[in-house]
Amino acid sequence: MRLNRTTVGALAVSATLLVSGGAAFAASGDGSRGAARCEERLAKAADKRGVSAEQLQATIEARLLARIDAAEKAGRISNERAAKLRERAAEATACGARKQVKARLAHGGMLKAATVFLGLDRAQLRQQLPGNSLVGLAEQQGKSAAALRAAMVAPAKARLAKAVADGKVTQARADKAAERLDKLADRLASKVFSPR
């Protein structure tokens, strides 16, 4: 399949919206304001390509579905996984990725902090997690679950404190974010990861 400029442009726009745009909106706390900004960016990207925002969204969805079909046909993903991905692609919008990006960033940062706290590298953590939880690994090392959870949220809370000090975020908003981080850390630390 040969890619033309429109195809490459659509793929670039979708990647930009989902990665940089999603991360930027994840940083903004007001969901309606973030959604409005995302819609504006989507409209600008569509205008640059001479199509409507709806057409651009349809093109992005069609490309995603084509990639899912190709992966399923090549045997890289199962039929069940392909069905779930098709369902998510049909329900998703380019501006709907905000919460997913935010959650992935938080999970990644917490897992990295837990890895450091446990004194493991990524490969060792991957090897030891199946059939276990982060709390279980910490207890095996004689470390407390509370200390693990505190270590998991410490980097994010430090960034929140800096944002408050710099005037970028209000204290009330930082406190709400910290509460959500604590809940996420509790769930992630207690989650028993499925065996391979």
Image (cartoon, grey):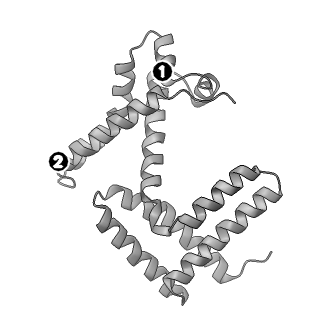
Amino acid carrying mark 2 in the image: Ala
Q: CA distance from mark 1 to mark 2?
A: 32 Å
Would you say 162 lies left or right of 21 here? left
**For residue 140, side relative to residue 62 (left or right):** left
Residue drawn at the location 64% of the way across and 25% of the way down? 127
Residue at the location (58% across, 26% down)? 125
Asked if the residues shown at circle 1 and circle 2 are in contact, with their CB atoms under 8 angstroms apart, the answer is no
Count of numbered circles on the image = 2
Tag of residue 2 = none
Residue 67 versus residue 145 in the image, above or below: below
Q: Secondary structure at mark 1?
A: helix
Quadrant position of residue 85: bottom right
- The answer to whether 51 is drawn above or below residue 119 in the figure is below
Q: Secondary structure at mark 2?
A: helix
Residue that label 2 marks: 172
Q: Position of residue 158 (x, y in %)?
A: 28, 38
| Residue lying at 55% horizontally and 86% vertically, measured from the top left | 49
State the image coordinates of residue 90 (x, y, percent, origin top left). 59, 66
Rendered location of residue 184, percent (x, y): 39, 37
Q: Is residue 12 left or right of residue 182?
A: right
Residue occupied by mark 1: 118
| N-term-proximal mark, 1 vs 2 | 1
Where is residue 51 shown, x and y percent of the image? Answer: 54, 88
The amino acid at mark 1 is Leu
